[in-house]
Amino acid sequence: MDLKKLKIEAEKGVKKASNLKELDKIFKKYLGKKGEIARVFNSLKKLSKNEKKKKGKEANLAKIGIERIIKEKSKKLKEETRKLKLKKERIDVTRPGKKIEVGHLHPLTLVQREVEEIFESMGFSVIQGPEVETEWYNFDALNIPKDHPARDIWDTFWLKNQRLLLRTHTSPVQIHYMEKHHPPLRIIVPGRCFRHEATDASHGVQFYQLEGLMVDKNISVANFKAVIEEFLKRFYKAKVEIQLRPSYFPFTEPSFEIDVRKGKGKWVEMMGAGMVHPNVLKAAKINPKNWQGFAFGVGLDRLAMVRYKIEDIRLFYSGDLRFLKQF
Ligand code: FA5
């Protein structure tokens, strides 16, 4: 083929190539080992010396020319691809960010923390105890003998093959603490409790209690009443009515139950309480002649229900986000 025509054709091809792959094809077609230019060089053999020189020079020039335009085009295409990539990957830092949903504390945790704070300001320490208990701590040491009907007050979850159970109340922590600490003492014990009983709007199989214990010299029911009234006043930040009902717990004498009413709401049974029974002090090797104390066990769920006007305790454990998002 005429070298001039070849060059023009190659130029056209290069111009048309819209990507590097197409350009590579053109390179092979003209400059490859079996390409058009190679063919021209091969055909030189048949020519005379003079003609060989002349045509050879022409072919060389055509080769250099085609190489140059391919190189230029390749550079251009590479630049274009880079620009395109940059454009695609561009990040607009001025765009408003995605809103990330942040979780928050469960209403019972909020209530627990607030209650802890109030009691801490009155000199009580926050103590933890085990959720799995022995019969001794959950019952015997609390003056609830084996086979005594009083045990039936607490429907118990027993653990298989062992004399272990899920604590039915936080009172066993009184014993743990008094075994290791000598009076005077002032503690509160928030924690989860378990009872093998039918659930309803105010009873769960698991719930939270907060135990309180104060042991000192000359402690009376008046001290208990003062502490608990102060606590309720600060917790509800509103007028609440309190009702003390005589009751029975084996580990306190006298014993009472306390109902609370906020505004015009319902009366809610909030806590059991009383003066620590001498037998309990003895079980913890504290001499009841020298020391007296009061104790109480308040339902954290119930405190929260009255505060937030929640009708059903089971909502706390439902994991329902429509409920939880309100706090
Ligand atoms: C007790 O558990 C005693 N240990 C309380 C106590 C402590 C008395 C120290 C004297 C001295 P009672 O079973 O009444 O008592 O429970 C106390 C409070 O826990 C109740 O008033 C209630 O607020 C809460 N409560 C009890 N059972 C449940 C339940 N199933 N679901 C939710 N809250 C409960």
Image (cartoon, rainbow, N blue to C red):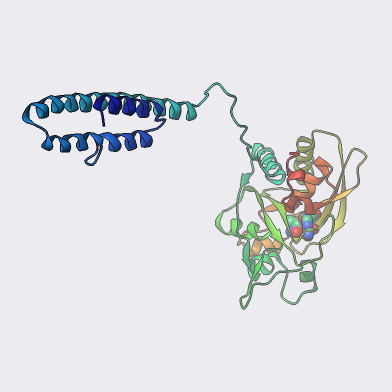
Q: Is residue 99 left or right of residue 50?
A: right
Expressed as whole percent of the image width and height from the top left, the position of residue 117 reads 66, 38
Q: Nearer the viewer, residue 249 or 10?
A: 10
Which residue lies at the image location 66% right of the left edge and 42% below the top edge? 105
> Is 322 drawn above or below residue 291 in the view shown?
above
**Ligand 1 positioned in quadrant:** bottom right
Identify which residue is drawn at 71% across, 48% down: 218
Residue 17 position, x and y percent, is 39, 30
**106 to the left or right of 11:** right
Which residue is at 28% across, 38% downward? 28
Q: Give the number of marks.
A: 0
Residue lying farthest to the right in this orientation: 264
Q: Position of residue 84 (x, y in %)?
A: 45, 27
Residue closer to the observer: 279 or 17:
17
Residue 325 quadrant: top right
Residue 271 visible in rendering: no
Residue 15 versus residue 302: which sits nearer the camera?
15
On the question of residue 39 being in view, the answer is yes
Quadrant containing the C terminus in the rendered view: top right
**Residue 37 falls in which quadrant of the image?**
top left
Residue situated in front as seen by the camera: 58 or 51: 51
* Quadrant in which the N terminus is drawn: top left
Along the horizontal axis of the image, is 217 left or right of 85?
right
Q: Is residue 126 above or below residue 136?
A: above
Question: Percent from the top left, x then y, of residue 287?
Answer: 64, 59
Task: Give the residue furthest to the top.
Answer: 94
